[in-house]
Every structure is written in C-alpha cells, then in structure tokens.
Image (tube, rainbow, N blue to C red):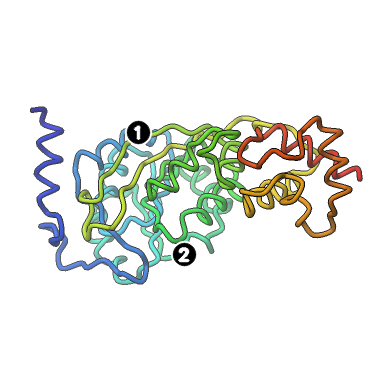
Amino acid sequence: MSSKKQSKNANRKHHGKAPHGYGGIRPAKGLGQNFLIDEGVIEEIAEGSGAAEDALVIEIGPGAGALTIPLAERSGYLAAIEIDENLIEPLRVKTFGMDNVEIIHADILAVNLDELIESRLSEYGLKNVRVVGNLPYYITTPIIMKLLETAHGIDSITVMMQKEVGDRIAAEPGTRAAGAITYPVYYHASVRKIADVPRECFYPAPKVDSVVLRLDIREKPAAETKNTDLMFKCVKAGFSQRRKTLLNSLSAMEGMDKETINSALERAGIDQSRRAETLTLTEFAKIADILQEA
C-alpha cells in the first residue's frame, strides 16, 4: 500500500470525531463548515491548484487551516479570507512566523477582489493569481459566479464542492448532465477534476460526497455574442423549465412571446421542440443575438 493511501486511511478513521490538533475548534453549522481532515486530499488540492512562488493565492474559507499551510509553503503570497470571527485568531496563531500569509476576516461575497488582487500583485511582484477554496455547499454557485464575472486577473479557481454540483459544472454543454450553471462556467473557463472526496474525509462528515474541480480561465470566452446578459437569461429560462420545449420555456422570459421566440428559433435553425439541455453554448448565443435584433 502506498504512503498516500495509508495517509488517507489513517485520517478517515476520524469519521464523526474531532481530529487531533484542532485545539478545540468546532465547525459552525450555521456557516456550513466541514473541515477537511484527509492529508492525501489536502496534498492533491495544494499540488493541483497551481500554487507556486510567483503566484498570489487567495484561499476562500480556510477554516481550521488544514490547507492554508501547504498552500503558503508553495505560494509567493497567500491571502486567506475567513468569515468566521472565531477562527481568525487560531489561523493567525497557526501561521505565526509565515511572513507571506495574510488572514482577512471578511465575507468573500463582499470583498473587492479586483482591489485585493491588484494591490498584492504589485506589492509582492507576483505574476499570476490562483484561487483555492472549500466552499460551503449552500453558496457554492454565488461564489463561483462572483469569481468568474467580477474578478479580473484570476488564472485559475480550484474549489471543493458537493459532487452533484460539481458534476453539473464539469458537464459538457448540450448533454443530459448539463445544467444552468454549466454554461456560464464553460463560457469563462475550462474545467478539470482534481480529486473525488468521500464524505468521511471531513469533520463533521457531511451527508454527501464532494469533488475538487479546477477552473482555468480562458483567454477569450468560449462563444461570441452581442449580449452576454441576454444569452444567459435564455439559458436560465431554458433550464428553469427544462422539461418544456424551448418555445415554451423561452417564451416565459419577460418581454418575450411565442411568436418572437418561434421566429428567433427558426432563424437560428433550431427546432422549437428541443429542450435546453440539448443546446450548445454557441446555439444559445445565436438565439440571443437574434433576439437582440428583434
């Protein structure tokens, strides 16, 4: 048996128990905290994240700091953003003496990431930005969309999430596995899996398994459109009623009617009886461009 597998088995016996060395820190249920305790998975995430000496690493939700240390050891500078005030001092104690680590008490959804990225890159002479995080399941999508849509300069996003959500994000547009989240992620980034993470790798163990994905930001979007907002409104409408035909689901958008949608679908060469999950991103872009002109 490899040392890596031995490490995993050793850690998984903590299932349901507080792991040694957490110093009395207890996960906050209200914040959806589940602390990662599997050393093998921690190593896979740190290695797969792209953290390096020339990188600014932004860690979202460091929790008890299990991933913070290996990330800091690899990176040029680490800014760890934690919302739980009770974890700030323990994190600062754990990273004491590491002068390339900054612990920030804040809600990631309220942080001005552009300002943070610009100032730290300039101050420390770094070349790229890697975001890493173990995201609370209940706000996974808002955090990912904030990173993709509002933060500039990010090279990759490596995140842990519920496996079901991860499967949607990693799906190919136009397949049965695709969901509304698939399309904006695919538009901005290419996706690859870093690791599958069984529930017993956490304390406390959640009720579902997880997956770690790495989103590498594209140099240019995966599709061209005259109106990005309208394109994603079409995606959202299509998947909000995914069992309905495109004609019916898209007609539910504000300001649209069946005649307008039918005409747009005909001009785009798309059968009105198709469903959203069968469309590629390029096809949604075509529909949006035609509706933009209507």
Residue at 10% across, 57% down: 20
Q: Residue 276 falls in which quadrant of the image?
A: top right
Quadrant the N terminus occupies:
top left
Within 10 Å of disc 2 (Cα), the crowding (few <14, some 14-19, many 20+) is: few
- In the displayed structure, 19 sits above or below 267; it is below
User: Where in the figure is residue 31, as x and y percent of width and height?
Assistant: 37, 67
- In the displayed structure, 13 sits above or below 46; it is below
Residue at 82% across, 32% down: 268
Residue type at mark 1? Gly
- In the displayed structure, 173 sits above or below 66; it is above
Residue at 61% across, 43% down: 184
Q: Nearer the viewer, residue 245 or 190?
A: 245
Marks 1/2: CA–CA distance = 25 Å
Q: Residue 223 falls in which quadrant of the image?
A: top right
Label 1: element kind: helix
User: Where in the figure is residue 45, as x and y percent of width and height?
Assistant: 32, 39
Quadrant the C terminus occupies:
top right
User: Where in the figure is residue 275, as x and y percent of width and height?
Assistant: 66, 41
Q: Which residue is mark 1?
A: 48
Q: Nearer the viewer, residue 238 or 17?
A: 238
Asked if the residue at tag 2 contacts the one at tag 1, i.e. Cβ–Cβ closer than 8 Å, the answer is: no
Residue type at mark 2? Asp
Q: Nearer the viewer, residue 230 or 255?
A: 255
Within 10 Å of disc 1 (Cα), the crowding (few <14, some 14-19, many 20+) is: some
Question: How many numbered discs?
Answer: 2
First in sequence: mark 1 vs mark 2: 1
Residue at 32% across, 36% down: 195
Left or right placement of residue 152 versus residue 283 in this view: left
**Residue 107, labelled with which disc?**
2
Left or right placement of residue 50 versus residue 148 in this view: left
Label 2: element kind: loop
Residue placed furthest toward the top: 2
